Amino acid sequence: MTEIPPVPAGKPISASRTTLSHIMTANDTNLLGTVHGGVIMKLVDDAAGAVAGRHSGGPAVTASMDEMAFLAPVRVGDLVHVRAQCNWTGRSSMEIGVRVLAERWNESTPATQVGSAYLVFTAVDSDGKPRQVPPVLPETEQDERRYQEAQIRRTHRLARRQAITELRERRAAEGLDD
Ligand SMILES: CC(C)(COP(=O)(O)OP(=O)(O)OC[C@H]1O[C@@H](n2cnc3c(N)ncnc32)[C@H](O)[C@@H]1OP(=O)(O)O)[C@@H](O)C(=O)NCCC(=O)NCCS
């Protein structure tokens, strides 16, 4: 008889919430002299990966990144803060929400939000196979809203994937190979 592993105990969102801060340098710029979007995406993936590892208590890989929005340019000298938290958990996957803020080096104004993203990480074992994660426990009304919104995004991701798979199967059955 196959043994079903016990569901790990739940973990509060605050236990793995993480902020990664980084000062932008001339190495990070694009041809316009502002920070390259890919540099920000790397920081987003790093911060989200730290949250996924801390929440799941082991290795986790990026399965997808969606809704990466760049709201304002980041400049050389800006102090960028990447805030990430686990919004939702499935069996082995976690949705990590990320907010990117920038403090201008020459202004004493509050940090401006310059970007946001949602990533799905899957916790894996030493063979790279998905493993079970602890259910995430929302602690505030805002956490609860984010959990519910993440559930909507999850439903849409699965529906989109299913619809595309069905379309490809239909086309293949009609001999429309590409
Ligand atoms: C992510 C990965 C482990 C999934 O493995 P798999 O054999 O397809 O496993 P499953 O289909 O059982 O999916 C496992 C979980 O991941 C989720 N998942 C898989 N692919 C996904 C995708 N593209 N987007 C969102 N979630 C995804 C599934 O919904 C499932 O979640 P659940 O357990 O909470 O229900 C595998 O595709 C992989 O190793 N990808 C490469 C990841 C990587 O190397 N990232 C770094 C990029 S260089």
Image: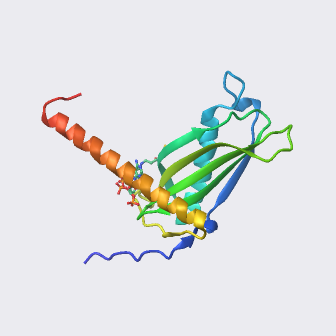
Q: Which quadrant, please, contains the C terminus?
A: top left
Residue 24 pos. (x, y %): 75, 37
Residue 98 pos. (x, y %): 60, 51
Q: Is residue 10 above or below residue 22?
A: below
Apparent side of residue 73 relative to residue 9 in the rendered image (left or right):
right
> Can see residue 7?
yes
Nearest the viewer among 113 and 77 is: 113
Nearest the viewer among 113 and 89 is: 113
Apparent side of residue 100 relative to residue 58 in the rendered image (left or right):
right
Q: Is residue 70 above or below residue 20?
A: above
Q: Residue at x 38, y 75 (%)?
A: 5
Quadrant of residue 37 in the image?
top right
Q: Which quadrant, please, contains the N terminus?
A: bottom left
Quadrant of residue 90 in the image?
bottom left
Q: Residue at x 80, y 39 (%)?
A: 104
Q: Residue furthest top?
A: 31
Nearest the viewer among 152 and 85 is: 152
> Can see residue 123?
no
Q: Residue at x 17, y 35 (%)?
A: 172
Q: Residue at x 38, y 54 (%)?
A: 155
